[in-house]
Amino acid sequence: MTTAALPVALVGDGLRVPCADGTELPYLSFDAAASTSAMQQVLDAVEAFLPWYSSVHGGVGYKSEASVLAYESSRLAALAFARRQPDSGDVAVICRNTTEAINHLAYRLGLSRGDVVVTTVAEHDSNRLPWARAATCRYVECGKDGTFTPEDVAAALDQRPVSRLLTVTGASNVTGWLPPLPEIIAAAHHRGIPVLVDAAQLVPHRPLPAGADFLAWSGHKMYAPFGAGVLIGPRRVFAARDPFLVGGGAASVLDLDDVAWAAPPEREDAGSPNLIGAVALRAAIGALEGIGWPDIADHERRIARLLRRGLAAIPGVRLLGPGPDTETLPLVTFIVDGVPAALVAARLAAEEAIGVRHGCFYAQPYLTRLLGLTPAEARATSERARKGDRTLMPAAVRVSAGINISEHDVARLLSGIERLVAGKPPVRYRRDPSTGDFYPVRSGARVGQPLTRGMRGAQ
Ligand code: PLP
């Protein structure tokens, strides 16, 4: 059974791409957790706005005013999407993506090495490295299934020195697990510690947590791939001191040796902003809210169940992360006995025209734990990688879906994986040790030039 409005086709769905045997198949992306195609409403909104595109900062004239209005409306839409009341005192900073938003905040909080930030071993590098550079991280460990409890978080928050911030993912990009945010946020607030939720994975799937002090997310993971993301936080944080980026637009008064920073959020807007990205973001917010979270969550829960059950039933496939009773996003990470993850991904791409992700997913410490590697084993593989051989890097395969994926698509993926597990490849694959990737070869040469052949219709 499908929900009335779902699945929703995305721009580019069904494009035919070349396979290793010379045939063409409709491309099927099971890589939504990395990036999503645009929703049609997003593309329509961008096209409708483009004739009105003009300068945002300081321009005078009808089109400039229309552009300022569009930009500021996007900020307001982002705040409402994050369930902030108009009088909440929060601001939305439009930036490039989650990574930039988190770097932005790590600078903005004015941290030093003596400050502690509590985070978890389940984080994406983009929610770990900015904190590890700006402060000292204290990590919440996870169990074998990749989960942790609010009590685990509370225990880390209770250690001394008191932490300046708790930063936690809203949903894991490796297991699709949804940490219990309300309890985790409450535990931090009970101790007077503010919380950042990295909502990169959460944002296209579930409502954003109203209780988080700070939120960061990316448009390209919510069907608005036009280069804009959002950082939300209290105005007072952005009213103190200098902004992350300095330049035109960030200062209201300027002399050679004098600067008065503009009020937030303009203070954070140095340089010409990504107005088209902001327009796309607002359109995606409107489109997702138009479908409605209950329908989105219902549909994706069904897809998640089908993926989990179907993959778990294939001999030789082992799922990583929490068991079947735990709710997850429509995202499953797995390994196949005796087949390198990179080969599984290469074969799905070349033989089935299905795009998935493989490797560490920018979360190597977490994947290492999920795979049950000892610290010594993890160090040994990293050492070999540093010497140019990435073939033994910890790796798994990830399939991830969004609102465009149907039950039929899941069935196609599962039969592709069944074929792959059961049979020998129809073509030979060669591995590049420097990347660890496989690619199909015939008579010693890489098969075709898939990229240029596949883009024929796009030129
Ligand atoms: N956080 C999580 C949980 C992610 O999955 C990702 C990207 O996959 C990021 C942060 C970084 O997002 P972006 O590349 O859009 O900056």
Image (spheres, helix red, strand yellow):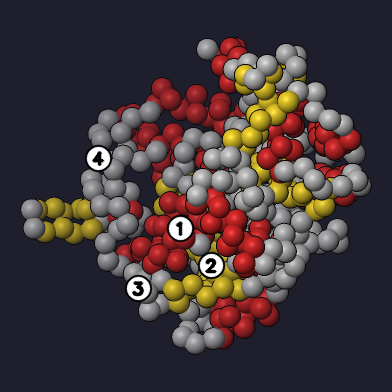
The residue at 16%/58% (across/down) is 259
SS state under label 1: helix
The residue at 80%/45% (across/down) is 338
Which residue is identified by label 2? Answer: 167
| Residue placed most toward the observer, 238 or 337 | 337
Task: Say what amino acid the circle numbered 4 marks.
Answer: Gly
Q: Considering only order in the chain, which callout, 1 or 2, is on the residue closer to the N terminus?
A: 1
| Residue placed most toward the observer, 456 or 388 | 388
Q: State whether residue 125 appears in this view.
A: yes
Q: How far across and how far down the image is residue 350, in percent?
A: 71, 26
| Residue placed most toward the observer, 285 or 174 | 174
Q: Considering only order in the chain, which callout, 3 or 2, is on the residue closer to the N terminus?
A: 3
Which residue is identified by label 1? Answer: 102
From what the image shows, is residue 128 above or below residue 387?
Answer: below
Q: Considering only order in the chain, which callout, 1 or 4, is on the residue closer to the N terminus?
A: 4
Q: Is mark 4 within 8 Å of ligand 1?
A: no
C-alpha separation, residue under disc 2 versus residue under disc 3 = 16 Å
Q: Is mark 1 within 8 Å of ligand 1?
A: yes
Task: Say what amino acid the circle numbered 3 marks.
Answer: Ser
Q: Considering only order in the chain, which callout, 3 or 4, is on the residue closer to the N terminus?
A: 4
Q: How far across and how far down the image is residue 330, in percent?
A: 75, 47
Q: Considering only order in the chain, which callout, 1 or 3, is on the residue closer to the N terminus?
A: 1
From what the image shows, is residue 432 above or below residue 185?
Answer: above
The residue at 52%/75% (across/down) is 138
Q: In the image, which is nearer the foreground, mark 4 or mark 3?
A: 3
